Amino acid sequence: GAGVSQSPSNKVTEKGKDVELRCDPISGHTALYWYRQSLGQGLEFLIYFQGNSAPDKSGLPSDRFSAERTGGSVSTLTIQRTQQEDSAVYLCASSLNIRDTQYFGPGTRLTVL
Amino acid sequence: AQKVTQAQTEISVVEKEDVTLDCVYETRDTTYYLFWYKQPPSGELVFLIRRNSFDEQNEISGRYSWNFQKSTSSFNFTITASQVVDSAVYFCAFGSARQLTFGSGTQLTVLP
């Protein structure tokens, strides 16, 4: 079956602009996660959604970052007023339920000029 | 808080050699899960294996094998008879309730 998909695969933006990154989880997976992979910080957890529960936002680095998940499926990660330090690969993962294995998408490479 | 340490930043071997990637974790949780993921040059994280904290059986899958020892908080990964296609970054990860905590990764290069 289809895996996790993310779009766009690459995004180049100017400092100060807002960006939206999209994630389509595996069909039937109730849990969805966003991670960030950057050279200096490795792989960091950002936010997690499980069903209709309130998301766990404990990993978001600043209030410029937000995410939503519509209809329990597709998720959008929004970064407002982008900064150069936001440049990274943003990875989305989904799992059947919490504590189940997470499967990752191909990522979105964000470059902030 | 959990912590995962992959002390080997880079490893280089010649094809057909065996190689072991080390992973040590720290936690106070009694129930947890350990994972290995592979990240080839294409960038996508590929799931390799998951072990539950209550199951210390070692596992073998083809050329891959995993040694989980709770007594030393280690979850090491061995590739037997390595191949060039095994070249990638390998991440060990710890999971308890929700998110994964990743190690810093080991870059494995297999030379022909």
Image (cartoon, rainbow, N blue to C red):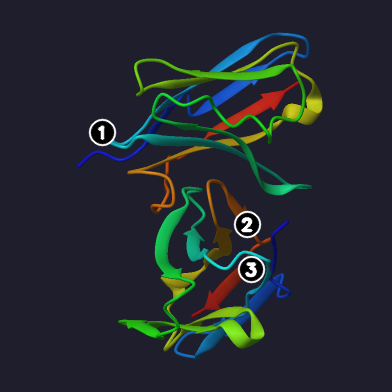
Q: Nearer the viewer, mark 1 or mark 3?
A: 1
Q: Which amino acid does label 2 sit on?
A: Phe
CA gap, disc 1 and disc 3: 31 Å
CA gap, disc 2 and disc 1: 25 Å
Nearest the eye: A38 or B4: B4
Q: What residue type is labelled 3?
A: Thr
CA gap, disc 3 and disc 2: 11 Å
Q: In which quarter of the image is residue B106?
A: bottom right
Give how far across and how far down residue A3 sits, in percent.
Answer: 30, 40
Mark 2 chain: B
Q: For the N terminus of chain B, which image quadrant? A: bottom right
State left or right for residue A55 relative to residue B86. right
Q: Nearer the viewer, mark 3 or mark 2?
A: 2
Mark 3 chain: B
Which residue is drawn at the image coordinates 44% and 35% (left, top)?
Answer: A32
Q: What residue type is labelled 1?
A: Ser
Helix, strand or loop at label 1? It is: loop
Q: Are marks 3 and 2 in contact (CB under 8 Å)?
A: no
Residue corresponding to mark 2? B102
Which residue is drawn at the image coordinates 24% and 38% (left, top)?
Answer: A2
Q: In which quarter of the image is residue A20?
A: top right
Helix, strand or loop at label 3? It is: strand
Residue corresponding to mark 3? B106
State left or right for residue B1 relative to residue B33. right
Nearest the eye: A53 or B57: A53
**Crowd rating for badge 1 (residues with CA inside 10 Å; few <14, some 14–19, many 20+):** some
Q: Quadrant of residue A96?
A: top left
Identify whether A55 is placed above or below A82: below
Identify whether B88 is placed above or below A70: below
Which residue is drawn at the image coordinates 36% and 22% (left, top)?
Answer: A72
Residue corresponding to mark 1? A27
Identify whether B35 is placed above or below A79: below
